[in-house]
């Protein structure tokens, strides 16, 4: 059973974000899938480097018979140590297993992980995996509220459930196109305009789910205060950009 705990992130813009933490169940589902894919790569590597290359050395003079096994050992080493780190680096915190399970590794700040964090957290798998079936990692996850294994503590990372953008919807009701605006954009204060523009400027620094949650919370705050409604099908970022543009057009913010 996955944990229903939330990760709370207080951004510099004073927006409190809450993300659902990935529990032991979803993380082990991802691990099982990734381990299966690793096993397939091990099998392919064994066939190619241990059997086919030595066979080729018998047919083609000059190729040492030891080349195949040596390359095979190197290939298995790369798969074991590089599989998780490579995918988490290029897929922004996800492996094939994590993508299937709908979870993602992010920094404690909510930002996407870099190659440095991906490599650091996965180097600790050798310890987390002891004495077998991730015993150390499982105990560590059970002893902290955020379900973090040793690798997460070392790299400063955390695993959260990923929520698709179309699943995160604002709480406002979409207004009809001909509905008059009851509260003008001049209701927005200077601090709120700074908040909107700071988000728009920094949004690409955040992970996708953190960015979406931040946009929705800011838009809900503006909508609740001004009564301004987004156009049908309008993206949250476009709504905030429109609000900021209208606010800047007012004499108070020039």
Image (cartoon, rainbow, N blue to C red):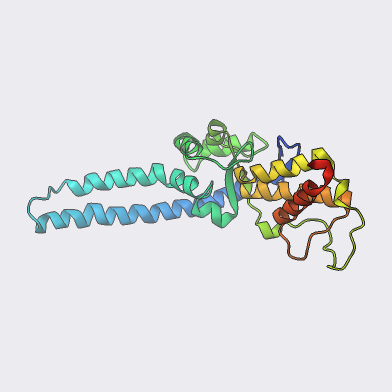
**What is the count of numbered marks?**
0
Q: Is residue 177 above or below residue 18?
A: below
Left or right: residue 105 compared with residue 80: right
The location of residue 227, given as percent across then percent down, is: 88, 54
The location of residue 140, given as percent across then percent down, is: 58, 34
Q: Is residue 140 above or below residue 85?
A: above
Left or right: residue 112 compared with residue 245: left
Q: Nearer the viewer, residue 120 or 113?
A: 113
- Whether residue 213 appears in this view of the structure is yes
- Whether residue 216 appears in this view of the structure is no
Q: Nearer the viewer, residue 21 or 186?
A: 186
The location of residue 211, given as percent across then percent down, is: 67, 47
* Rendering quarter of residue 198: top right
Q: Farthest residue in the left direction?
A: 61
| Residue drawn at 16 percent across, 45 percent down | 66
* Rendering quarter of residue 106: top right
| Residue drawn at 69 percent across, 51 percent down | 212
The location of residue 36, given as percent across then percent down, is: 44, 55
Quadrant where the C terminus sits is top right
Left or right: residue 165 compared with residue 193: left
Q: Nearer the viewer, residue 2 or 216?
A: 216
| Residue drawn at 40 percent across, 41 percent down | 81
Q: Farthest residue in the right direction?
A: 182
Q: Nearer the viewer, residue 221 or 156?
A: 221
């Amino acid at each position: 059973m996955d944990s229903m705990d939330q990760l709370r992130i207080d951004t510099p813009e004073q927006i409190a974000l809450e993300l659902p933490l990935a529990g032991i169940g979803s993380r082990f589902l991802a691990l099982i899938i990734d381990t299966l894919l690793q096993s397939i790569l091990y099998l392919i590597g064994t066939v190619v480097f241990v059997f086919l290359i030595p066979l080729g050395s018998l047919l083609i003079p000059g190729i040492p018979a030891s080349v195949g096994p040596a390359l095979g050992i190197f290939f298995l080493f790369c798969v074991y140590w590089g599989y998780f780190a490579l995918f988490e680096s290029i897929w922004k915190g996800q492996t094939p297993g994590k993508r299937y399970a709908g979870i993602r590794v992010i920094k404690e700040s909510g930002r996407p992980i870099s190659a440095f964090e991906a490599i650091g957290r996965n180097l600790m798998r050798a310890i987390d995996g002891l004495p077998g079936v991730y015993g150390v990692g499982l105990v560590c996850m059970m002893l902290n509220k955020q379900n973090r294994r040793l690798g997460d503590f070392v790299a400063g990372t955390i695993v959260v459930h990923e929520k698709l953008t179309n699943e995160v919807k604002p709480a406002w009701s979409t207004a009809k196109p001909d509905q008059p605006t009851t509260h003008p954009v001049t209701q927005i204060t200077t601090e709120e305009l700074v908040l909107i523009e700071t988000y728009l400027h920094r949004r690409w620094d955040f992970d996708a789910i953190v960015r979406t949650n931040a946009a929705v919370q800011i838009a809900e705050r503006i909508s609740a205060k001004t009564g301004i409604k987004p156009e049908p099908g309008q993206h949250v970022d476009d709504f905030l950009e429109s609000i900021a543009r209208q606010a800047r057009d007012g004499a108070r913010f020039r």
